[in-house]
Image (tube, grey):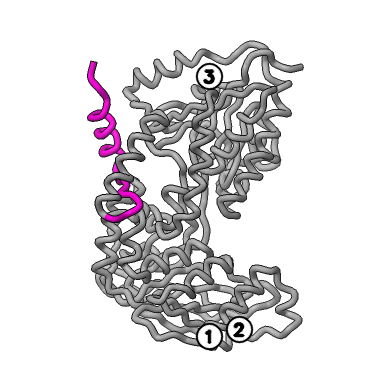
Amino acid sequence: MSLERPVRVAIVGAGPAGFFTADALLRLDSPRFEVDIFERLPTPFGLVRSGVAPDHQKIKGVTRTFEKTAKHQRFRFFGNVTIGRDLSHDELAAHYDQVVYAVGSSTDRRLGIPGEELMGCHAATAFVGWYNAHPDFRDFPFDLKVERAVVVGVGNVAIDIARVLLRDRGELARTDIAGLALAALEASTIHEVVLLARRGPAQAAFTAVELEDLTHLASIGVKVDPAQLQLDAAQLEALDVNSRRNVELMRKLAANPRETARTLRLEFLASPVELLDDGNGRVCGVKVERNELLGDKARGTGQFFELSAGLVFRSIGYFGEPIAGVPFDAKAGIIPNVEGRVTRTPGGEVVPHLYAVGWIRRSPIGVIGTNKADGQAVADRLVEDVAKLPAAPPRPESEMMALLAQRRIKVTSFHEWAKLDELEVAAGREKGKVREKFDTVTAMMNELLRSTPSN
């Protein structure tokens, strides 16, 4: 059976996973999809805007692809709408044939060690949001007037944090970094960032591209203990391409140390076991246990050392947050699903017409481009399930808009985002930056009110 009417789809989350899914659906002539994307912020693009480091502008170029999708006549953007607060899931589902959640993983995994509650210990998610002008993190109290920072984790986000903390401030000043963050970095006294990895260099999660980028920055030296890089030819050959390249790069760095004012130190086979208190409720150091590898698994040796540090970031993975009315796997931090079709419990019964895509579907793995294949795969599931839709259309859109108006929710369109985009770029140009971002929702909405002619 094929529907003669259009299939109405709501996608919750305007990041890469949401846009790639929308694009895959809108490319089809039959079934004919109409796609609305809902986003809790007035701005689209998710982690491309608020997660990609400001000195990685090339990566942010993917938004040009999303802008093409947004111009499609069967696409609409509903910004400044939080599903689960402004509209319940059931209210949303009543107005659409199919609903896709593409909300990502917005919180972090905890270390679970004593001292984690001390001032000066922060989630990587908060710091990344802060330097990217995400409204949720604008007022976080990051004190950068310390000598050393420790980042627990060796993924790409950990490398990003280290690079932003150590990079030449003049170079950062030309990016779209948040103004508040740039001012704090210009006053920073950090001269060393230590990345702690519980396993060895062969298991490091960052990509070789990220590590190689650091080697081209004259202001940052990279230190790694040559003794931790001892792999024989057979061990090296057994690694995948990225891991082998990582080890080769680290060997070059170890063999040719560079003296600089600011240093990134890679400390492998090391797990934090306690954050140390300075007596005033603030972190002053990290107690670390040396590990040994048993196969690919790390085991503590009972040998300890201490690192002085006034700032600690946990960067050991992202975790999803539940949405009222939507199934959630609290252990895995994702919406339970089978190939994108949401299930009531992990491995349980499929919920009709409900889907998940991106990190909230598969957990926080992969890069931005990974979401393109994921979006296409989940879009294929929606197409397969069109035959199961009722012949009658969902409730009219006018009812949903009336609900939002009744609740005094000011919905922003993609056209209105384009106005904000122009203003940010213009403000940045005056300062010699790529853009100067609005960092509060209030500022965004006030600007839109000023630019909207009164009746």
Q: Are marks 1 and 3 in contact (CB under 8 Å)?
A: no
User: Is residue 221 placed above or below 38 in the rendered structure?
Assistant: below
User: Is residue 184 placed above or below 65 in the rendered structure?
Assistant: below
**Region of the chain picked out in magenta, as a range:** 432-455
- Kind of residue at badge 2: Leu
Q: Is residue 262 magenta?
A: no
Q: Nearer the viewer, residue 107 or 127?
A: 127
Q: Position of residue 120 (x, y in %)?
A: 32, 65
For marks 2 and 1 on the same chain, the one whose residue lies earlier in the sequence: 2
Q: Residues within 10 Å of mark 2 (few under 14, many from 20)?
A: some
- Kind of residue at badge 3: His
Give the quarter of the figure containing the N terminus. Answer: top right
**Label of residue 254 in the image:** 1
- Mark 2 or mark 3, whichever is nearer to me: 2
Label 2 residue SS: helix
Q: Residues within 10 Å of mark 1 (few under 14, many from 20)?
A: some
Q: Nearer the viewer, residue 108 or 211?
A: 211
Q: Residues within 10 Å of mark 3 (few under 14, many from 20)?
A: many
- Kind of residue at badge 1: Ala
**Label of residue 95 in the image:** 3
Q: Position of residue 13 (x, y in %)?
A: 49, 37
Q: Nearer the viewer, residue 332 or 242?
A: 242
Asked if residue 410 can be seen in this view, the reply is yes
For marks 2 and 3 on the same chain, the one whose residue lies earlier in the sequence: 3
Q: Name the residue beneath numbered marker 2.
A: 229
Q: Is residue 427 left or right of residue 413?
A: left
Asked if residue 286 can be seen in this view, the reply is no
Q: Are marks 2 and 1 in contact (CB under 8 Å)?
A: yes
For marks 1 and 3 on the same chain, the one whose residue lies earlier in the sequence: 3
Residue at 60% x, 54% y is 366
